[in-house]
Amino acid sequence: MAEQRDDGKPGSEPGTDIEPKAGGQPAPRLDEEQLRQFQQFQQFQDYLKFTEAQKQGLVPTQPAQPVTQHYGGQPPAPPGPPPGELVPAPRPRMPRWLRRLGGKLLAWIIVIVLLCVGATIAYRQIFPSDAGQDTATFVQGGGGKHHTNQVLSTNPWEAVRAIYDTIGKPYPPATRVEKVCLSMSEQAQAQFARDLGYPDCATAVPALNAKVTDITPYIYAVRPMSSVVPRQNLTIHSCWYNIRGGPLLGSFTLQEVEMGQWLITGHANSPDPCPAPPTGN
């Protein structure tokens, strides 16, 4: 017979018999591991009986939970996030003074943007843009940039020489038209084209360029005739010069305008006989 404790339960301690075998023979003694496995087996049998009773309606149905045996007296760990999932940290609350400061900065930014937009609109009303205009339309309007920008020559002789230089050199067509035509007033553009037999300045310039046969003597033919520059209208005649390698461009009348610039304000064909050039030191 197996040894019994005072509480009358056989096999309550490791190493004791579970129950006597038939015929009075003691059951084999179990060590700790075997006893733990035997207890788990009994719990599993109880779980099977419980689930079977649920199926038969003998006990209230409860969600099946896996039976987990804890050892060593440690409570189960609280449930946590799934493995690999990051738990977002609590977002710190922005201080009230910082929120107020951010609101004021945003208001100032909006005011500055509105002021910039208003200034841009006003500037475009006062100084219309030439964007979107073709070259012919732009030059027919006279440009007008010389009123506020230094775009013309400050020497009348150089202003006429630049006409020959631009027509003679291989500039891009649009650049050549702008440089020549915008150095003249609208009235001078019309006179220049009409005197040379073309409908407008934008048509005359590329046609005259096609007649240039020798660039070097053509672009360097015009030079100052006097060191004295009059502060009034001045007419410079092409017949004063020995112009070779291209067409003779006639007579140009110039006037001093804003910022000491000289604008071509009139044109005529070269007179015959040609007047004497000015002299002076």
Image (spheres, rainbow, N blue to C red):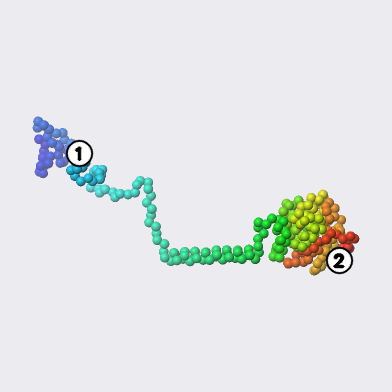
Residue depicted at x 80% and y 63%: 266
Specify whether residue 159 is in view. no
User: Could you tell which of marks 1 and 2 lies nearer the N-terminus?
Assistant: 1
| Residue 12 appears anywhere in the view | yes
The quarter of the picture where residue 178 lies is bottom right
Locate the C terminus and report the quarter of the image it occupies.
Answer: bottom right
Question: Seen in the image, is 274 located left or right of residue 167?
Answer: right
Pinpoint residue 247: horizontal percent, then vertical percent. 83, 53
Image marks 1 and 2: residues in contact by CB distance under 8 Å: no
Mark 1 highlights which residue? 45
User: Which disc, if any, is residue 56?
Assistant: none
Nearer to us of marks 1 and 2 is 1
Residue 206: percent from left, percent from top: 76, 52
Could you say where residue 203 lies in the image, as x and y percent from the top left? 76, 54
User: Can you identify the residue that label 2 sits on?
Assistant: 280
Could you tell me which residue is drawn at 30 percent across and 49 percent down?
A: 79
